[in-house]
Image (cartoon, rainbow, N blue to C red):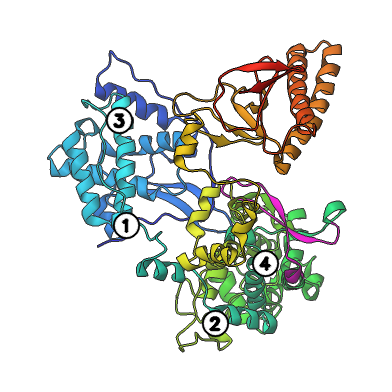
């Protein structure tokens, strides 16, 4: 079974942010509304539609920290099976698919369009099966159901479910915009396949382990970090060291700035951190390092800055002089030359005059320069031609880093001289490149392309003798697992990992059921439950006794406990418990009495602020003054009773709406009350 289109978790920079809105006209038929829809989208700014609409291969986005482009290829299902761009989807379905991709991109953006494009391919294939040609207006329930069947038969269960979700989204668009007629909203009906999220199955355990680096891999990374000398080895080992200091995504690591090291001040005095670029909607942030990792992080950053210093010098030069050739110190004397011999070109390019033959090939074949006779049977080339040919080699996004339109190359760590990371090609001394995802991934063995991994070059293997290969993201999984085992809260792990949503932690939860249970087991062994209910402070009651209290429901509050039955109606005071008659406070509960005293201090402060606002005649200030006065009066009343030695510990204290306290030592239902020195006593 095919795995189907793969979506990527790597971050992308989207090319446009325009929003489209199309309102169908009731007096027009489906085809007329569809034509108007296509024309609207064709003339929009979304994904540079005016320039790209007639092409069948669109540039959708660029991945952060990567030189690759995310494209939308409007080919048929059969062409996609063979990774071919042709044949394209037939007309008029092709224009509809392009317009719908633009519209959905503006309203329901997705990181990668591959699954969405796959859904359009399935619809077009289903139209063919029903002999309906390539007419979008011919789509009906039968066609949509057939498209789901095609997806189910061609893709893996999980990918088929995602394609079906896009089919439902497309069907909703077509129905609501009146391109097709349906009796009701169409639902794809596929059940989401079970994912390996269980803690107890063998398959789930194996899936978790595959995402984590082995002990041998971690030992190897430490050894390589210590022994690395070549620039590419320093680059890879230092970046992986930083990814073990904080759980960063590879695109965030590759977007480190040269001034990323932070020395803490004030409350962070004595702490050290790293400035990281955010992704997936998370803000840029400074992450403070564990003390034990500070020397590792400092050494890694120093190694990176040293290894990339030459490339940084070139990047600075071209940022300041974008149309002028950079000459290293050994070639600086050639600046005013009109012509360059092939030996001099070799010196400029690779700092090696003996590479004249390679320089001639570069000039004639690669750069396609016109040769000039220099006399004495010597051939040369104009300096200006060589200069322009080299300048054309600048990164496509220069002066900015690949995938980051806000980070200048001269400010980034991830710059290397051209071919500096290649084992068999000569390094350019006049041009730089941006290190990208493949620089790290290929060295770690994630993408086997025949080249040796960094582990093979340094002679490291798994404990069973097999080759070591890891993905950069496995280090993020590893640090998340350590955080979970170490007891960090979900909020702390999300902040630690640079996540906007705590729910994203779930994909990184690799704790077994035993590991989850371990803290509870240890707490029970240590007598944790003995502190939950202090001995002699209160007695348990039977269910019959509880019913005798006349209470249908109860729950604790910050100051006592509440008898309100939430099953019958919600809280009418929005948990303003202190101003509620259904709350009982128990004298002798120290932590709740402390909460009352804190509320008293806070209310006095708020009352002062409200009174200041009242003197300045701010709107609504009088309402807040009344509310704070009422709250403060009720808190003081309860505290006065709690401080009264005549009231026994364990007594229930309740304030009526009028403010008079109700007090009792007996767990009885309120029946009547009498006034005693200004108080009401329960009977």
Residue 251, compared with residue 650, is above or below; it is: below
Q: In percent of the image, x 34 and y 42: which residue is there? A: 166
Residue 679 in sight from this viewpoint: yes
Is 110 left or right of 24, judged from the image as shown? right
Q: Secondary structure at mark 2?
A: helix
* For discs 2 and 1, the disc positioned in front in the rendered view: 2
According to the image, label 2 marks what residue? 216
Name the image quarter holding residue 325: bottom right
Density class for disc 3 (Cα within 10 Å; few <14, some 14-19, many ≥20) is many
Front residue (pair 430, 338): 430
Residue named by callout 3: 174
* Sequence-earlier tag: 3 or 4: 3
Residue segment shown in magenta: 269-294
Instruction: Kindly identify which residue carries mark 4.
Output: 245
Instruction: Name above or below for residue 185 compared with residue 366.
Output: above
**Circle 2/circle 1 CB separation < 8 Å:** no
Tell me which label, 3 or 1, sits earlier in the chain: 1
Looking at the image, is 243 positioned above or below residue 131? below
**Spatial separation of the CA atoms under disc 2 and disc 1:** 33 Å
């Amino acid at each position: 079974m095919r795995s189907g289109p793969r979506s990527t978790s790597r971050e992308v920079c989207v090319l446009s942010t325009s929003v489209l809105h199309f309102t169908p006209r009731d007096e027009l038929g489906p085809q007329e509304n569809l034509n108007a829809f296509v024309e609207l989208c064709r003339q929009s700014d979304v994904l540079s539609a005016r320039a790209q609409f007639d092409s069948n291969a669109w540039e959708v986005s660029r991945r952060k920290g990567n030189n690759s482009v995310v494209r939308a290829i409007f080919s048929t299902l059969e062409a996609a099976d063979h990774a071919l761009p042709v044949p394209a989807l037939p007309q008029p379905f092709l224009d509809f698919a392009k317009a719908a991709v633009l519209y959905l991109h503006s309203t329901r953006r997705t990181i990668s369009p591959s699954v969405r494009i796959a859904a359009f391919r399935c619809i077009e294939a289903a139209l063919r099966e029903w002999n309906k040609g390539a007419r979008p207006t011919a789509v009906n329930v039968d066609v949509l159901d057939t498209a789901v069947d095609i997806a189910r038969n061609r893709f893996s269960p999980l990918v088929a479910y995602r394609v079906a979700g896009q089919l439902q989204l497309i069907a909703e668009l077509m129905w609501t915009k009146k391109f097709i007629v349906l009796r009701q909203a169409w639902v794809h009906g596929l059940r989401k396949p079970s994912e390996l999220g269980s803690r107890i199955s063998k398959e789930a355990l194996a899936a978790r382990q595959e995402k984590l680096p082995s002990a041998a891999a971690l030992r190897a990374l430490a050894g390589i970090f210590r022994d690395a000398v070549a620039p590419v080895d320093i680059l890879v080992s230092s970046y992986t060291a930083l990814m073990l200091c904080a759980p960063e995504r590879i695109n965030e690591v590759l977007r480190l700035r040269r001034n990323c090291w932070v020395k803490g001040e004030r409350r962070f005095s004595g702490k050290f951190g790293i400035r990281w670029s955010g992704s997936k909607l998370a803000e840029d942030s400074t992450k403070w390092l564990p003390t034990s990792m500070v020397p590792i992080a400092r050494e890694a950053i120093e190694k990176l800055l040293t290894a990339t210093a030459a490339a940084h010098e070139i990047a600075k030069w071209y940022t300041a002089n974008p149309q002028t050739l950079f000459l290293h110190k050994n070639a600086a004397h050639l600046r005013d030359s009109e012509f360059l011999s092939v030996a001099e070109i070799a010196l400029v390019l690779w700092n090696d005059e003996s590479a004249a033959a390679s320089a001639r090939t570069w000039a004639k074949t690669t750069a396609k320069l016109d040769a000039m006779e220099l006399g004495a049977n010597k051939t040369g080339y104009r300096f200006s031609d060589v200069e322009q040919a080299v300048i054309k080699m600048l990164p496509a996004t220069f002066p900015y880093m690949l995938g980051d339109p806000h980070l200048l190359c001269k400010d980034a760590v991830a710059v290397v001289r051209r071919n500096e990371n290649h084992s068999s090609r000569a390094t350019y001394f006049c041009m730089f490149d941006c290190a990208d995802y493949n620089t790290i991934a290929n060295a770690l063995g994630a993408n086997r392309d025949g080249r040796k991994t960094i582990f093979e070059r340094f002679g490291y293997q798994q404990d069973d003798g097999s080759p070591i290969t890891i993905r950069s993201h496995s280090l993020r999984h590893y640090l998340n697992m350590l955080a979970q085992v170490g007891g960090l809260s979900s909020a702390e792990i999300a902040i630690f990992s640079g996540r906007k949503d705590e729910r994203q932690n779930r994909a990184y939860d690799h704790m077994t059921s035993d590991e989850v249970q371990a803290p509870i087991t240890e707490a029970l062994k240590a007598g944790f439950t003995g502190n939950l209910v202090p001995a002699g402070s209160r007695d348990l009651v039977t269910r019959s006794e509880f019913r005798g209290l006349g209470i249908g429901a109860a729950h604790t509050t910050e100051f006592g406990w509440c008898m309100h039955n939430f099953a019958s109606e919600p809280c009418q005071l929005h948990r303003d418990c202190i101003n509620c008659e259904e709350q009982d406070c128990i004298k002798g509960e120290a932590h709740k009495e402390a909460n009352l005293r804190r509320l008293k201090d806070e209310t006095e402060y708020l009352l002062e602020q409200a009174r200041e606002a009242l003197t300045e005649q701010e709107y609504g200030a009088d309402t807040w003054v009344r509310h704070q006065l009422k709250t403060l009066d009720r808190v003081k009343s309860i505290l006065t009773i709690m401080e009264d030695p005549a009231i026994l510990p364990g007594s229930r204290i309740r304030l009526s709406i009028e403010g008079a306290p109700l007090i009792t030592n007996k767990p009885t239902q309120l029946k009547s009350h009498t006034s005693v020195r200004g108080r009401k006593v329960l009977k």
